[in-house]
Amino acid sequence: MPRLRVIVLEQEDVDRIKIALWADVPVARQRFYARPAGTVSAWVDALPGDNTNLINGSVAEMTFEFSRVGLILAQIRALVESRWQQWQTLVTSENKWVRYGTTWDGTTWVAGGVA
């Protein structure tokens, strides 16, 4: 489980904000989200444990930017919370590996797959 869900990273100019989102990855799919040793979060203040979670794949990180023109703080927060929920739902429900490892030896098919 990620320690945080949303991190405001930077405001390039008065109108654009960059955000990082952390999502919890289902155990069976963590190896596909795992990152190389030395990987660090886009957030420079991430704790060592946060970076370890990105490396072992238990947490997935996504960053995005958006324009805040015409939005008040409550709208920005609602937008970012909604975007996090979409990210978490995608990580939880999308399974590109449902047939991963299925093999055929020339005679017999052996079903694979990751839950």
Image (spheres, rainbow, N blue to C red):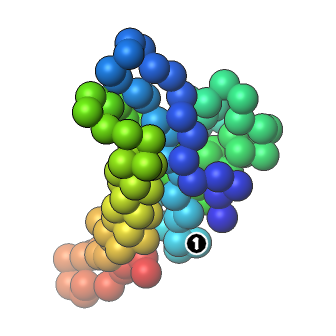
Q: Residue 39's image quarter?
A: top right
Give neighbour class at mark 1: few <14, some 14-19, many 20+ (Cα, 10 Å).
few
The image position of residue 34, as x and y in percent, is 55, 50
Is residue 71 or residue 52 the one in the foreground? 71
Residue lying farthest to the right in this orientation: 48
Q: Amino acid at mark 1?
A: Val
Circle 1 is placed at which residue position? 27
Is residue 107 or residue 21 the one in the foreground? 21
Image quarter in which the N terminus is found: bottom right
Is residue 51 or residue 109 the one in the foreground? 51
Q: Residue at x 32, y 21 (%)?
A: 15
Whether residue 39 sits left or right of residue 80 in the image: it is right
Residue 64 visible in image: yes
Q: Residue at x 43, y 29 (%)?
A: 18
Q: Residue at x 72, y 29 (%)?
A: 45
Vertical order, 66 against 55 (above or below): above
Q: Residue at x 44, y 41 (%)?
A: 73
Callout 1: helix, strand or loop?
helix
The image position of residue 111, as x and y in percent, is 32, 85
Whether residue 106 sits left or right of residue 88 in the image: it is left
Image quarter in which the C terminus is found: bottom left
Residue lying farthest to the left in this orientation: 106
The image position of residue 29, as x and y in percent, is 49, 67
Is residue 37 or residue 46 the one in the foreground? 46
Q: How many marks?
A: 1
Vertical order, 90 against 77 (above or below): below
Residue 57 visible in image: no
The image position of residue 38, as x and y in percent, is 67, 29
